[in-house]
Image (spheres, rainbow, N blue to C red):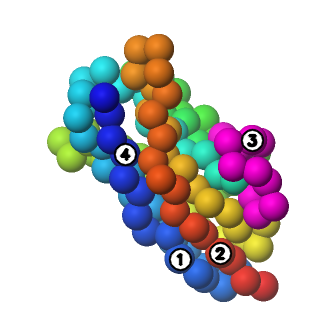
Amino acid sequence: QVQLVESGGGKVQAGGSLRLSCAASGNTPCIAAMNWYRQAPGKEAGKERELVAASPNGGSITYADSVKGRFTISRDSTKNTAYLQMNDLKPEDTGVYYCNAPCFTRDYWGQGTQVTVSS
């Protein structure tokens, strides 16, 4: 079992910045990657989550085209924590951001943190 706890969401004006954190605990050695997804307002929970940034163990980091150059994913292995630095935020970045960690055949998810960007 892996537990993921996100923090760092909030409300910000367009052009502002936020930093999200995702702390993993439990069976952390099984984690193969730490990723960030988001779900836009109006979307039913569990459907149409968009992959924002992915950081696989020993692999290349990837970003959604919509956030390239503005968002940066990083990890601190000593703290089992992943971060998402979000700069130059836009209203379309509004949504609930979820941390994801695949572990063997299961996907683990955090509870989500709300990000609201006003114009």
| Residue where numbered disc 1 is placed | 10
Residue name at image x 68 percent, y 77 percent: 117
Question: Nearest the camera: 3 or 63?
Answer: 3
Question: Whole-percent x and y of residue 104?
Answer: 41, 15
Q: Amino acid at mark 4?
A: Leu
Q: Tell me, yes or no, whether the two marked residues, 1 and 4, touch with CB atoms within 8 Å.
A: no
Q: Is residue 98 visible?
A: yes
Q: Which mark is residue 116?
A: 2
Question: Whole-percent x and y of residue 13?
Answer: 66, 85
**What separation in Å lies between label 4 and label 3 (alpha carbons)?**
20 Å
Q: Tell me, yes or no, whether the two marked residues, 2 and 1, touch with CB atoms within 8 Å.
A: yes
Question: Nearest the camera: 59 or 38?
Answer: 38
Work out whether mark 1 precedes mark 3 in sequence or the reverse, and give the earlier one. Answer: 1
Q: Nearer the viewer, mark 2 or mark 4?
A: 4
**What separation in Å lies between label 3 and label 2 (alpha carbons)?**
20 Å
Q: Residues within 10 Å of mark 3 (few under 14, many from 20)?
A: few
| Residue where numbered disc 3 is placed | 47
**What separation in Å lies between label 2 and label 4 (alpha carbons)?**
21 Å
Element marked by disc 4: strand
| Residue where numbered disc 4 is placed | 4
Q: Residue furthest top?
A: 105
Which stretch did the figure color magenta? 40-51
**What separation in Å lies between label 1 and label 4 (alpha carbons)?**
18 Å
Q: Amino acid at mark 2?
A: Thr
